[in-house]
Image (cartoon, rainbow, N blue to C red):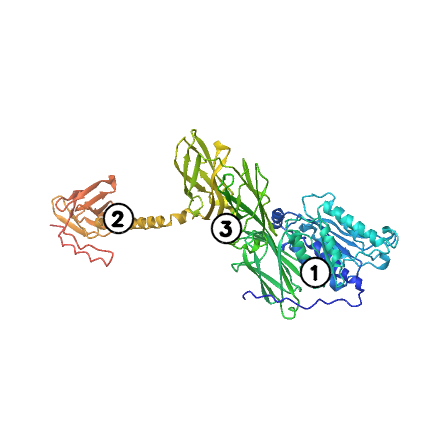
């Protein structure tokens, strides 16, 4: 089944009847607490506990943890159905959490209207979101319950937020983001709370305390993300809380700053909470819905280093299958295609977490038996990536008043140039400025819009020009900052330089190397140098932002006074093992730049050139030399066949078959004759029977006292077992056998071949032994 467009469910979720209006927010809020707290809690895989080296641990290291608190307004009532819906939504968000090192605290709150009551219920204390803690969270969230009038059911924001702030700050690393999700109807209301003074001023006093609490939250770098429920939300109150807490989250972008969200019904809580969580945690997210059977396509960016596909099935009978961009099914926890997978599941929720995911369009296939297809299923994607940059200045050492072109090229975490899929960095913010000796900072505009001096729009290179102030006297520095939602990006990327003298005595021009290579290759570039000074200059060569995968040789060049040498620059590509997973897709793009600088002149950069080299794996030894091996094997086979043929031919020439053997007495009389037959290795083995008797004869016998074989030079060769003597037998020169007997050769019978039957031996001549 091919990918289908999901069809969102437009029907509102059912509401409970007979519920007081002001308690309706709690229905959703309490369950959402469960949602938020499970927001990061990983579940065990199908086999039980997650492995020690599971991908979730790597994910945590990749994106860093978050400490957050979910603060739920208990001043309303929670229906059983709404609570179940919110817990399910929360669990789905929890499965998408990418760091097992994150922690969550869940607080319920209302008011304290007499000394026996308390404002805050610490439902779930600060809990680490590893697999072992998941059961604790799912159990403690069930403690959320609507307050009755006798328990204090007003809405005390300042006390609840102060408790959350204190828990997030106490004993935690200030470098770890601190986030509060506040679930409420957005109305501060404490008319019955004596702690806020006389009845006429209680709400005003509480409002003042809220302002002070939010100021402390901002000072302690605690973000506040309010979510308001129902149709009676005070949006202005929510906006004030969001804007009064800490504003500088993971990136300095509008979408990552805390904001208030209105949630009209419980059916939209999960999406609203995921959006808020993703923004606070610096993740990219998307949500799609549909009813099974359906294929839901989800896209994972090439920039993603870790991601989660989270499915809320709505019905336990629904089955889920995951297919990567090559339509290969991922069936559970494990490793394949240079990616690591962790499968986790809940009652109606499940997730596939992926470290180093294969980019492209994934497919989530949902199916269900008849009678279980009415529930709306939700598929969410959360991912995080890394982005870097490289800066090239032209000229690298400008003169005062000269216009300089600055190019900033986007690169992935592995220093690979980013040339496509720029849809993932559409909200990228790039700011730059030129600083240096003798002048005030100059802002610099960099754009990737294709307008000069930018070469092409949306190619991942941001370009701009700046005029160096006439008052510049020494050092220069171009500093650029990248910020992008869902991406860990460069902060204050910079490139240093020097103001050039009126006349440059030493110059360098670099011809670019090839743009494609194999691992372990050596690329060649040409470096033309000139030294107009009266002293020698030592120039250095280095590669910046190349990830150590390209090494220049020589690293230094000495240019004599008045010299104008041309140097062959060798760029060695690292071996296959150094690339790690970069070559997992079949090739890797190496980015960076070659920098030539003058160590004799304060390291002044003489020239720099951007690099973009596509590297493919060098074939293995067998693949590299396969044609030589094939050719050698063919030649060897031919040689073996030739040798076998020659050997066979030689054996055929020496085969005794057909030799006419004659047994001769000492007086020269022919006593008997025998036609030899082929034996082992072409020998005819025989004995002389009755050598001293009146009728001696030749009898074939394996292992006999004699054996005879043809001689390639003509005649035959006779060997005797005793003494292993060897004699040549000629037609005209019989050989003695002993006992007065001689072996001679007679007229030869027809030769036999392997292609047909042997001819019958010639009849022996009749002899009279008595003659």
The answer to whether residue 130 is left or right of residue 295 is right
Determine which residue is flagged by label 2: 647
Point out the tag, 3 or 1, that comes first from the N-terminus: 1
Determine which residue is flagged by label 1: 269
Q: Position of residue 488 (x, y in %)?
A: 60, 48
SS class, disc 3: loop
Q: CA distance from mark 2 to mark 1?
A: 89 Å
- On the image, which quarter does residue 538 sit in? top left
> What is the residue that sits farthest to the bottom in this orientation?
370
Assess disc 1: are there few (<14), some (14-19) or many (≥20) residues with their C-alpha within 10 Å of its C-alpha: many
Residue nearest the observer in this picture, 362 or 770: 362
Q: Is residue 97 visible?
A: no
SS class, disc 1: helix
Cβ–Cβ under 8 Å for marks 3 and 2: no
Q: Position of residue 27 (x, y in %)?
A: 76, 61
Which dot, 2 or 1, sits closer to the camera? 1
């Amino acid at each position: 089944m091919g990918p289908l467009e999901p069809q969102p469910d437009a029907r509102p979720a059912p509401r409970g009847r007979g519920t007081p209006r002001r308690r309706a927010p709690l229905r959703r809020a309490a369950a959402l607490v469960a949602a938020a707290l499970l927001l990061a809690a990983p579940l065990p895989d199908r086999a039980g506990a997650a492995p020690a080296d599971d991908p979730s641990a790597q994910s945590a290291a990749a994106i860093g943890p978050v400490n957050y608190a979910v603060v739920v307004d208990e001043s309303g009532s929670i229906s059983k159905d709404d609570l179940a819906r919110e817990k399910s939504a929360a669990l789905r968000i929890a499965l998408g959490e990418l760091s097992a090192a994150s922690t969550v605290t869940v607080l319920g709150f209302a008011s304290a209207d007499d000394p026996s009551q308390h404002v805050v219920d610490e439902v779930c204390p600060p809990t680490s979101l590893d697999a072992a803690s998941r059961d604790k969270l799912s159990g403690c969230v069930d403690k959320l319950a609507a307050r009755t009038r006798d328990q204090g059911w007003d809405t005390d924001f300042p006390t609840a937020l102060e408790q959350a702030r204190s828990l997030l700050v106490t004993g935690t690393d200030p470098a770890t983001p601190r986030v509060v999700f506040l679930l409420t109807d957005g109305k501060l209301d404490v008319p019955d709370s004596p702690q806020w003074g006389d009845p006429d001023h209680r709400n005003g006093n509480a409002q003042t305390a809220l302002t002070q609490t939010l100021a402390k939250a901002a000072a302690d770098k605690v973000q506040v993300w309010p979510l308001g429920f129902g149709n009676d939300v005070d949006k202005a109150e929510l906006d004030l809380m969001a804007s009064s807490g800490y504003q500088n989250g993971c990136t300095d972008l509008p979408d990552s700053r805390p904001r208030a969200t209105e949630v009209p019904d419980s059916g939209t809580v999960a999406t609203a909470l995921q959006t808020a969580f993703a923004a606070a945690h610096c993740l990219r997210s998307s949500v799609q819905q549909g009813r099974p059977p359906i294929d839901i396509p989800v896209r994972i960016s090439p920039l993603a280093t870790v991601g989660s596909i989270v499915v809320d099935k709505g019905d336990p009978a629904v089955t889920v299958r995951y297919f990567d961009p090559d339509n290969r099914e991922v069936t559970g926890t494990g490793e394949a295609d240079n990616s690591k997978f962790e499968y986790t599941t809940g009652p109606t929720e499940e997730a596939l977490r992926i470290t180093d995911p294969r980019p492209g369009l994934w497919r989530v296939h949902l199916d269900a038996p008849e009678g279980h297809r009415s529930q709306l299923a939700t598929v969410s994607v959360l991912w995080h990536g890394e982005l870097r940059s490289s800066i090239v200045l032209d000229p690298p050492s400008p003169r005062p008043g000269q216009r300089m072109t600055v190019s900033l090229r986007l690169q992935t975490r592995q220093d690979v140039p980013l040339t496509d899929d720029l849809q993932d960095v559409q909200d990228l913010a790039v700011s730059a400025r030129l600083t240096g000796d003798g002048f005030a900072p100059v802002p610099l505009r960099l754009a990737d819009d294709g307008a000069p001096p930018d070469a092409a729009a949306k190619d991942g290179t941001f370009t701009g020009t700046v005029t160096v102030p006439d008052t510049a006297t020494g050092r220069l520095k171009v500093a650029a900052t990248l910020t992008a939602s869902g991406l860990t990006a460069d902060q204050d990327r910079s490139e240093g330089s020097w103001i050039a003298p009126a006349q440059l005595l030493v110059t360098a021009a670099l011809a670019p190397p090839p743009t494609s290579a194999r691992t372990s290759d050596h690329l060649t570039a040409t470096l033309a140098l000139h030294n107009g000074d009266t002293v020698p200059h030592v120039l250095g060569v280095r590669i910046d932002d190349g990830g150590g995968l390209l090494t220049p040789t020589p690293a230094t060049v000495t240019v004599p006074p008045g010299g104008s040498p041309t140097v062959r620059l060798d760029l060695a590509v690292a071996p296959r093992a150094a690339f790690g997973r970069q070559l997992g897709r079949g090739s890797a793009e190496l980015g960076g730049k070659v920098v030539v600088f003058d160590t004799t002149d304060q390291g002044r950069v003489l020239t720099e050139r951007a690099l973009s080299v596509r590297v493919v794996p060098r074939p293995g030894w067998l693949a590299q030399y396969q044609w030589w091996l094939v050719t050698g094997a063919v030649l060897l086979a031919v040689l073996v066949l030739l040798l076998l043929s020659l050997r066979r031919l030689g054996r055929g020439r020496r085969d005794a078959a057909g030799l006419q053997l004659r047994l001769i007495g000492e007086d020269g009389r022919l006593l008997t004759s025998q036609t030899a037959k082929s034996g082992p290795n072409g020998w005819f083995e025989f004995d002389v029977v009755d050598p001293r008797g009146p009728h001696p004869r030749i009898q074939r016998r394996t292992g006999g006292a004699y054996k005879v074989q043809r001689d390639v030079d003509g005649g035959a060769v006779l060997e005797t077992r005793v003494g292993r003597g060897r004699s040549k037998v000629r037609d005209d020169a019989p050989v003695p056998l002993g006992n007065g007997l001689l072996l001679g050769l007679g007229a030869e019978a027809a030769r036999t071949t392997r292609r047909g039957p042997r001819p019958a031996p010639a009849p022996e001549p009749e002899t009279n032994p008595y003659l």
